Amino acid sequence: FCPSSAFVTLRSHPCAGSMDPKQYGCVLLTRGVSPGFAAAQRMEDDGGAPLSDELAAAEHDAFVQKLKPHAGRVITIPPDDAQPDCVFVEDCVVALPARGFFACCPHPSRRGEVHPVVGAAMGVSWPDVGPMKLRGLANEKQDELIEGGDVLYVKGGADTLHHYLVGVGNRSNALGAQALREALRSCATADGALHELVDEDMLFVVHEVDMSETGWLHLKSAITWAPNVGFVASSTECPVLRRALKCLDGFEATPVNKIRDPPVIVPRHAANVLALPKVNPSPNAVVFAHPDAVDAVKARGGDAVTVIGAEQPELARADGALTCCAVVLDPKFAWGRPRDPNYDED
């Protein structure tokens, strides 16, 4: 991936372009299933029939159709015959506050997936708000490895506004986590959120979660988080959950982040949920969950969320989950203002 070529290419990317003013809301990036999906990476062969790109494509198309009513716009990037895993678009970029984003550096076999996704993100713009901005990237020459499936955002409290949990040890490493940290720093500085009156950890903290000997490929295969729901996991004893919660010890819990509440416990195959921001005129934010998790997520979220069942079984055979297949770009995702006695409230 070459950042300079991304800047040149993206303004004319076929998926790019400004939104209709009537559709001021989050944009979702998705990507079609590769005809070469049968060669997609997976942790272990399930002993069944070869992976089917046709079945995966049909399931994924149905999922995208479910997403469309709950977003301002859904952009579908064309698939790449040479990239079997390209439908798992979240591994390519991470959304940052104030319309920033970070370009990942995934497994060497998947690096050809990144440029088209970066291009699509750079082409997104909203009326009266402006475009998405590339604020940093992981550098393969510096061995900075990071995949979006290892990056879980958790809304903070007044002490630290934003938490990014990064699973390290499998597909991502500490250098990749540091690259994300530097991108957040660059983003906050450029947006004027980070200055002499505000310490960095008042705005954000990037936490590294050790994924070694957990049995999970990515952090978000094991646990996810949604506003007004909290953490979703398969067990209170899940090592990824326990290590993530340890990272958040001492940070402020809120009615939205629920980081001190017990996790929502669901079957192992259903621990991945996809949260979307509220889109007018809907009264609630939306959480997509596996059908086997819907009732538990509804019970926790109550009237604050709308929960919609969705699954893609053929993609799941290749270790895919709901968040893998969509990148959420929200124009209202802002830095916010930290609480500090030295901060000028005026």
Image (spheres, grey):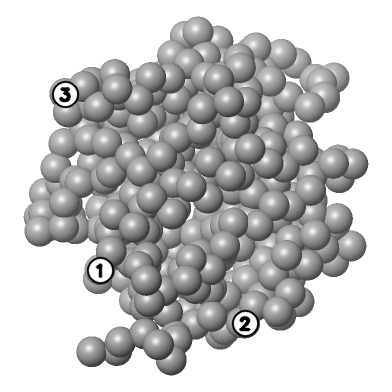
Q: Nearer the viewer, residue 234 or 55?
A: 234
Q: Mark 2 sits on what residue? A: 253
For the residues marked 1 and 2, what is the alpha-carbon distance in whole angstroms? 28 Å
Q: Is residue 119 above or below residue 34?
A: below
* Residue at image point 21% right, 22% down: 8
Q: Mark 3 sits on what residue? A: 12
Mark before the other along the chain sequence, 1 or 3:
3
Quarter of the picture containing the N terminus is top left
Q: Secondary structure at mark 1?
A: loop
Mark before the other along the chain sequence, 2 or 3:
3
Disc marking residue 280:
1
Q: Is residue 238 left or right of residue 162?
A: right
Please name the amino acid that badge 2 sits on: Ala
Tags 1 and 2 touching, CB below 8 Å: no
Q: Is residue 229 above or below residue 303?
A: above
Please name the amino acid that badge 3 sits on: Ser
**Any part of residue 277 in sight:** yes
Residue 129 position, x and y percent, is 16, 57
Residue 24 position, x and y percent, is 19, 58
